[in-house]
Amino acid sequence: MRVSVQEAPFDLGAEANRFAAGDTGSGAIVTFTGVVRDLAQGNLDVMEIEHYPGMTEKAIEAIADEARQRWSLADVLVIHRHGRLSPGDRIMMVATAARHRKDAFEAAEFLMDYLKSRAPFWKKEITGKGGEWVAAKDEDEAALDRW
Amino acid sequence: MRVSVQEAPFDLGAEANRFAAGDTGSGAIVTFTGVVRDLAQGNLDVMEIEHYPGMTEKAIEAIADEARQRWSLADVLVIHRHGRLSPGDRIMMVATAARHRKDAFEAAEFLMDYLKSRAPFWKKEITGKGGEWVAAKDEDEAALDRW
Amino acid sequence: MMDVLYFAWVRERIGIPKEKVETEAATVADLVSELVAREERYAAAFADLSALRVALDQELSGFDAPLSGVREVAFFPPMTGG
Amino acid sequence: MMDVLYFAWVRERIGIPKEKVETEAATVADLVSELVAREERYAAAFADLSALRVALDQELSGFDAPLSGVREVAFFPPMTGG
């Protein structure tokens, strides 16, 4: 298991290959990658991601541990960036490896649902008109009820 | 959308990066990669994958089209190998890009469920004792009921 | 005259991947009966139809489907892709 | 004496990311009342507690939680990770 909270960009392909390497016991590998999406108006300049150093790592590790208890997983990877990002930049990724695809898929969705609402990150969209904090969505909170 | 039925190996990382490149409208990218798993006995030498040239491509394209009708997807990728593979080799991958993570996850699971039971591939496990065709699992057929 | 294709263990039991068949069979089931009557290896391959799938012109179909206009019939076990 | 941290718009409204607070508050809610009584910027930040979350020593908690033994309190809006 690897958890990385970092300001630096990461290479999705390199991380996926590294994660998948040297594990012949797992038949299924799922990755999820979150990308900074431009706003509907198409005028997003910067996405600023603030986090709570110290708590962030602990919260993500607790979420990953919970996933490993609920599903039969060979490995878990979580990378989450903070700082200033541009449209098209990759914000974060999770990867799961399991013997069966159902475990790999469900665990990845669980990780994403919890990272959205329980890991201490806050996003601010900066446009020509100023900055605006992204509001948490009711549907993201509701997604946790599934688990 | 890209569908590739091929004998040659593919590079998961390179394919994931190529798929993710140049698409700032999608916030979510999901990949699934299937890996040749060694048998419980640990004596798998070769996994032979037979397919039905002509029908295979058509069947996969029909499954991918169905996914694009059911979910709001920016892009879909399916790569599936045939021929002789070794434990640890990647058999296939799917990738989905969508505005929302739920669409990307569900479409990837749908693609996998249908590729398992509706794309004309047959797997044979070759060990020191000979070859044995992999039997279709009831649970894989049952997985289709979800959709 | 149509092409008949066999895959996986169906191919192995019958011993060939493909053959041309001259037939007036109205349905897939009729074609299967004709093949089974030919030789033991066909009877072995088609012993349990519930373990088989059929495609007509590369589309999954059923054993009661009509063959009129069909150029390619394929028999195989349940698929194991992914 | 405890560290009190603010994130996102809570930090912006209060104007500082962190401060040391001398308090005898028994619960988080008591601490919030003390802060609100201090200055308008605190009142503005804590106007709607339903829009806020609190962590005690880096664990999510509730506004009725006791503060005894706690060294670090953090206030922030609902998280938007992922």
Image (spheres, coloured by chain):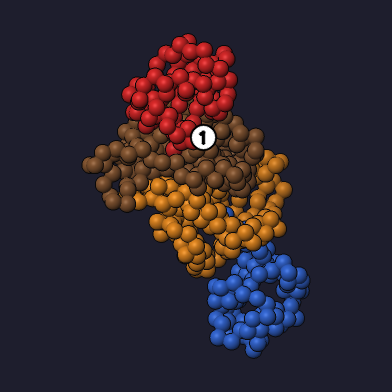
Chain colours: A orange, B brown, C red, D blue
Q: How many marks?
A: 1
- Provide the residue designation for mark 1: B118
Residue type indicated by callout 1: Arg
**Quadrant occupied by the N terminus of chain D:** bottom right
**Residue at x 66%, y 64% (from the top left corner):** D78
* Residue at left offset 57%, top offset 13%: C69
Q: Is there any visible trace of residue B3 in the rendered image? A: no
Q: Nearer the viewer, residue A19 or D66?
A: A19
Residue A129, compared with residue C41, is above or below; it is below
Q: Is residue D55 above or below residue A74?
A: below
Query: Residue at point 56% right, 17% down?
Result: C26
Q: Position of residue D27 (x, y in %)?
A: 66, 84
User: Is B10 drawn above or below residue A49 in the view shown?
Assistant: above
Mark 1 surroundings: few (<14), some (14-19) or many (≥20) residues within 10 A = many
From the viewer's perspective, tell me whether residue A129 is left or right of residue B143.
Answer: right
Residue B42 lies, in percent from the top left, at: 28, 50
Residue farthest along the bottom direction in this orientation: D24
Q: Nearer the viewer, residue A117 or A121?
A: A117
Which one is in front, C29 or B46?
C29
Q: Residue furthest left?
A: B128
Circle 1: element type = helix
Give how far across and how far down residue A133 sits, in percent. 68, 56
Above or below: residue B105 compared with residue C26 = below
Quadrant, the C terminus of chain D? bottom right
Residue A75: quarter of image? bottom left
Look at 76% across and 70% down and name the residue there: D48
Query: Dividing the picture into quarters, in which one does residue D47 lie?
Result: bottom right
